[in-house]
Image (spheres, helix red, strand yellow):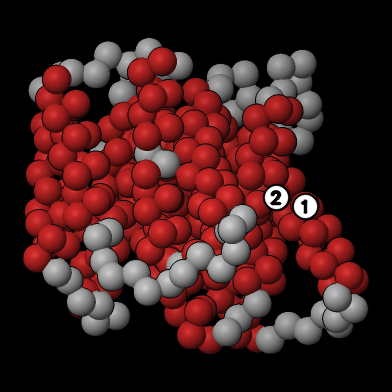
Amino acid sequence: MFYLILSILSSISVGVFLKVLKKNKTDIFQIIILNYITTVFLSFLIFKPNIQFSDNFPFLLISSLGILLPTIFVMQYLSIKNTGIIKTDIAQRMSLFIPILASIFIFKEDISNLKYIALLIGFLSIGFILKKEDNSNIKTKYSFLYLVFVFFGFGIIDICFKQVALYSTTPYTTTLFFIFSMALILSIIFYGSYLKIINQRFIITKKTVLFGSLIGVLNFMNIYFYLNAHKAFSSNPTVVFAGMNYGVILLGTLIGYFYFKEKLSKLNVLGLLLSVISIGLLIYSQLSS
């Protein structure tokens, strides 16, 4: 549970920095690249990965995450821009359905009645917490596709990271290094092509370097602790999938209220209480199993 808490705290910190970035009008694509430069450096420095390829090297898994991670960053940004932050947040949080279904049908987890109740209460809490006034309009008839990509993208990424944690032939730390490296290479290629298409010079500020590096450190911690949580709860992936999701929503909403002075309705408060109950039931079900 300790690793899960650390992963939640790291994820929330990334979210807070991204909110700050919106006010500072920082180039999101430069942030993504600097983020992956930092994660590659840290994973090489800390993990000292074995660069040699074995016969069972997880090329498909690394390729999938190497493509998905930077792509979901961009799609989330475009979704917020074209459909609004509330709709995007709902799509991201509801993506929990995908790894939960994977826990049952792929990872063959035996889910108790208590866990089912906890999950149901948790999904209700998501609905109540995200029930806010949304004045943003979908800009084009195809903008909903960004929401679809966010929904499936985050869900598939969760499943892939669970597979990374379970993979035994190659150490997950080595796999993580290659995932970050591939994400970095693809991000640089994409951004370089983008600058060439719009005929724009590459200009970067010290503030961008600082924010990008900080987000990279936090993102590294988030994924590293998340994988460790999956290894600790290898037979109970639902606890990690749901606990992470509900924990981020609960803590994120509280930070939004106390630090960013965001307003909470009675339904939002009810959602917070339900999320606490849901997390408590998940913990109890794990301790009593």
Q: Residues within 10 Å of mark 2 (few under 14, many from 20)?
A: many
**Dot label at residue 183:** 2
Query: Going by the image, does 202 lie left or right of 75?
Result: right
Q: Vertically, is 211 above or below 176?
A: below
Residue 125 seen from this side: yes
Residue 276 seen from this side: no
Q: Position of residue 126 (x, y in %)?
A: 25, 50
Q: Which residue is mark 1?
A: 186
Q: Residue at x 45, y 16 (%)?
A: 106
Q: Position of residue 13 (x, y in %)?
A: 39, 65
**Dot label at residue 267:** none
Query: Going by the image, does 12 lie left or right of 195?
Result: left
Quadrant in the rendering for residue 264: bottom left
Q: Residue at x 36, y 18 (%)?
A: 104
Query: Please, what is the three-letter code of the amino acid marked with disc 1?
Result: Leu
Q: Quadrant of the C terminus?
A: top left
Which SS class for mark 1? helix
Closer-to-camera residue (262/84): 84
Query: Please, what is the three-letter code of the amino acid marked with disc 2?
Result: Ala
Q: Residue at x 36, y 29 (%)?
A: 100
Closer-to-camera residue (273/247): 273
> Badges 1 and 2: C-beta atoms under 8 Å apart?
yes
Q: Position of residue 285 (x, y in %)?
A: 14, 27
Q: Vertically, is 58 above or below 243?
A: above
Q: Quadrant of the N terminus?
A: top left
Q: Residue at x 37, y 53 (%)?
A: 90
